[in-house]
Image (tube, rainbow, N blue to C red):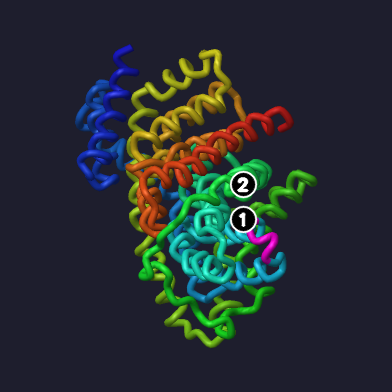
Amino acid sequence: MWSIFAVLLAVGLLTIMIAWGKVQPLLAFVVAAMAAALMLGMPPAKIPGVIEKGIGDLLGSLTVVICVGAVFGKLIADSGAARRIAISLIDTMGPRRMPVAMTVTGFVVGLPLYYNVGFVLMIPLIFSLVAQSGRPAVALGMPLLAGLSIAHGFLPPHPSPTALVAAVHADMGKTLLYGMVVAIPTLIIAGPLFSMTLTRIRAQPAAVFRGEPKPEHELPSAGASFFVALLPVALLAALTVVTLWRPALAPPLAFFANPMTVMLASYVVGMIVLGLRRGMSMAQVMGSAQEALREIAPILLIIAGAGGLKQVLTESGISAQLGAQLASLPVPPLLLGWAVATLIRVCLGSATVAGVTAAGVVAPLTQTSGVDPNLMVLAVGAGSLMFSHVNDSAFWMFKEYFGLSLKDTFRSWTMMETLVGSFGIVFVLLLSLFV
């Protein structure tokens, strides 16, 4: 009983340090891990080594994938490919189907781009379409932002799902395929359908947030933009399907199906198609990559800290004990994983922090319960998006960019994220009946 209480105290300390004390997350994780280790009776001399091992083990399998994913997304943004994708979809579907076009845009752009980058990149497009069409800004923009959020929470190579895949020993290709099955119906509900209820909310966006997008003649072609943006998803999905269809091909294809190989190959293709062939120098392409790596560094530090705490819980034995106790509860393991991530999300705000923190709790639950680890990644991802409120930076970004009151921000943004988390777990549970 004391062991469980000690874990709760450590998580509570983590919450207070990040949410109230504004402590940098890596430092907060390390302090919480040390506190947990001491309370759980771990010898003091052993604690630093355990934390270092946890940081190294988790980052060792993720650093290249996450960093290459960041530079790949930055290339998509800087080259104008993301904007070309949006313009092409909107032109193809026409003004009557604009909510559908915005939904598809958010999801496609969200596959290679991290949420904050995609948000800032797409805001000028949203506001320019508002000016052209006269549609309410919140109702028009919400489907696009829902697509960005869902890709961020559910699908590799985004940081939280990628870290969860490593923590619960899931398969990234299968997680991506299952994630698509869950994400699409969730997106339809939280995107175009929900946006129909937001037409009376009036936004007052500040002029400074509208931006000056690149002229269309400077953008890459639609074919090149779609090809490069979707290449890593297509490669991972295709190789996973082939190995499921012909298991004998799994060993010879293992190198090519590895996410690191896929991301590196996709980035090289992107460098050539969107960069070098369009007149960018190698120095310009690498300059963009350096900016991306600076932006992704804080996320890597969060994941590193979570790895240290996870290792303390594992080596102290409390992780297995907690997993066994959770597995004995009369609640489906996937629902428990979702609930753990939801609780951390409500307390800490960040979806990434919620996902990687929950990994340390749900990893033993996944092993003891025998639940599909790929589905556990999606269940935790759904929980990590629940009920975004005032401790979430994305909440304030949305409020300030659209010029909304707190009431309207809760009514629109918070409700959209809650719909994503709620229907996400519903569709994960339904999928668990068939896989």
For this view, does 5 lie left or right of residue 136? left
User: In the picture shown, does residue 275 fall above or below 174?
Assistant: below
For this view, does 275 lie left or right of residue 91? left
Q: Which residues are magenta?
A: 95-99
What amino acid type should be assigned to the residue bearing mark 1? Answer: Thr
Question: Where is residue 86 shown, x and y percent of the image?
Answer: 60, 67
Q: Which disc number belongs to residue 187?
A: 2
For this view, does 142 lie left or right of residue 224? left
Q: Looking at the image, which is closer to me, 289 or 134? A: 134
Neighbor class of circle 1 (other Cα within 10 Å; few <14, some 14-19, many 20+) is many
Question: Where is residue 351 shown, x and y percent of the image?
Answer: 43, 43
Q: Which residue is mark 1?
A: 103
Q: Is residue 10 visible?
A: yes
Question: Where is residue 88 shown, x and y percent of the image?
Answer: 66, 71
Q: Residue furthest right?
A: 245
Residue pictured at 54% horizontal, 28% vertical: 366
Residue pictured at 52% horizontal, 18% vertical: 327
